[in-house]
Amino acid sequence: MRINQDCIRDILLYIENLTLSEMQHGIESEELSEVEMLTEKYSKDDIVYSLIQLIDAGYLEGETYDYVYDPTSVRVDKITWEGHEFIDATRSETVWLKTKEKVSKLIGETSLAVLTQVATAVSKQLLGL
């Protein structure tokens, strides 16, 4: 599967808006796979794969489980510092669109770390810094 950068961003933005009590015992991929703001744009496979990649990359803390009845289930416990940095860098829709445009023109696709750096540079440019 390919990483869907928009799905990655939307998942992080959604989780960031959950309360501490909603995250007290973590949130399961099954729950996220039923969130309308995600399901109207992404398949369950995209959502689960994005969660796995976010955990592997250190943007989320959580665990992946393999069950007979559900091939892959993921529990997210929290957003890491790196995850928050990505959210902060890409929160603005204007910055996100310009970041994706710049990356696609120059190199096509890239890592989340590079996307964060490009988004930060775009923000500085928009602010005149």
Image (cartoon, rainbow, N blue to C red):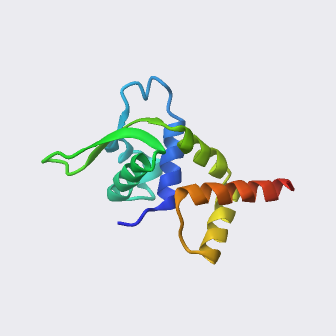
32 lies above or below 50: above
Q: x and y percent of residue 20 in the render?
A: 48, 25
Q: Quadrant of the C terminus?
A: bottom right
Q: Quadrant of residue 106?
A: bottom right
Estimate the x, y position of residue 42 in percent, counting from the top left.
Answer: 41, 58
Q: Please, which residue is most extreme toward the right here?
A: 128
Residue 95 position in % (x across, y down): 69, 57
The vertical placement of 17 against 1, above or below, is above
Which residue occupies 65% across, 70% down?
101
Q: Which residue is at 12% across, 48% downward?
A: 68
Residue 31 found in image quarter: top left
Q: Residue at x 62, y 66 (%)?
A: 100
Q: Position of residue 17 (x, y in %)?
A: 54, 36
Figure quadrant of the N terminus? bottom left
- Left or right: residue 29 versus residue 113 is left
Q: Nearer the viewer, residue 15 or 86?
A: 86
State the residue at coordinates (49%, 38%).
79
Q: Residue 99 or 56: which is nearer the viewer?
A: 56
Figure quadrant of residue 29: top left
How many numbered marks appear?
A: 0
